[in-house]
Image (cartoon, rainbow, N blue to C red):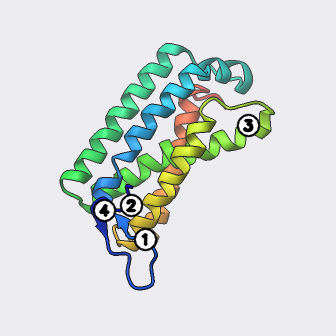
């Protein structure tokens, strides 16, 4: 259904047309909202404290997610209104940290701790496919060069590591 909405021709020999970047990026805040709900209802703050041995409570969870949602919606809206290189790179860095790398975090922590990582379902069923779709669009529609996109993903990984370090472990070494 979404593939046909404001689709861009995928080129000769392609089976499907891809949606426009400016429209598909709205899937990210929607998925993020559902992910927050899953994490909260599944006890993410308690999981961090008891299983990951960090320090996290419901207040920190709410404040972090409120701030991250505000940033994500702002970056998506800015790119929807007028895409520039700086805006697109900022969105790619921030969204990859909070969706793509977070999905891999949940996927990795589940077998490491031999326990469900709160947020795993939305991470795998929403984050991962949405990130792959947007990644394909970014490259095929030449929103960013492959090199810039790869660097943005690495920037997202660094941002994700920093957020985990300060948010869950409060700069502990």
Q: Residue at x 46, y 66 (%)?
A: 136
Q: Helix, strand or loop at disc 1?
A: loop
Looking at marks 3 and 1 on the same chain, the residue that comes earlier in the sequence is marked by: 1
Residue 52: image quadrant is top right
Q: Secondary structure at mark 3?
A: helix
Name the residue beneath numbered marker 1.
16
Disc 2: which residue: 3
Q: CA distance from mark 3 to mark 1?
A: 34 Å
Q: Is residue 20 above or below residue 74?
A: below
Mark 4 crowdedness (10 Å alpha carbons): few <14, some 14-19, many ≥20: many
Residue located at (44% from left, 64% from top): 149
Q: Nearer the viewer, mark 3 or mark 1?
A: 1
Q: Which mark is residue 20?
A: 4
Q: Mark 4 or 3, which is nearer the eye?
A: 4
Is there CB contact under 8 Å for labels 1 and 2? yes
Determine the secondary structure under disc 4. Answer: loop
Residue designated by label 3: 110
First in sequence: mark 1 vs mark 2: 2
Q: In the drawing, does residue 55 fall left or right of residue 136?
A: right
In the rendered view of the protein, which quadrant contains the C terminus? Answer: top right
**Callout 1: few (<14), some (14-19), or many (20+) C-alpha neighbours within 10 Å?**
few
For marks 4 and 1, give the CA distance: 13 Å
Mark earlier in primary sequence (3, 2): 2
Whole-number angstrom distance, CA of label 3 to CA of label 2 = 32 Å
In the image, residue 44 lies at what x, y percent? 60, 23
Disc 2 element:
loop
Task: Tell me if residue 75 can be seen.
Answer: yes
Q: Quadrant of the N terminus?
A: bottom left
Would you say 48 lies left or right of 6 here?
Answer: right
């Amino acid at each position: 259904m979404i593939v046909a909405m404001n689709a861009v021709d995928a080129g000769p020999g392609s089976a499907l047309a891809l949606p426009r970047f400016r429209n598909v990026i709205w899937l990210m805040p929607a998925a993020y909202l559902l992910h927050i709900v899953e994490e909260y209802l599944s006890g993410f703050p308690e999981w961090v404290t008891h299983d990951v041995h960090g320090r996290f409570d419901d207040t920190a969870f709410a404040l972090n997610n409120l701030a991250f949602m505000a940033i994500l919606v702002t970056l998506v809206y800015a790119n929807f209104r007028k895409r520039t290189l700086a805006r697109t790179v900022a969105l790619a860095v921030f969204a990859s940290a909070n969706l793509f790398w977070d999905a891999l975090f949940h996927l990795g922590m589940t077998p490491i701790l031999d326990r469900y990582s709160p947020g795993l379902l939305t991470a795998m069923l929403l984050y991962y496919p949405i990130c792959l779709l947007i990644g394909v669009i970014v490259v095929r529609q030449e929103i960013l060069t492959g090199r810039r996109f790869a660097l943005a993903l690495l920037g997202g990984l660094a941002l994700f590591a920093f957020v985990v370090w300060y948010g869950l472990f409060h700069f502990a070494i």
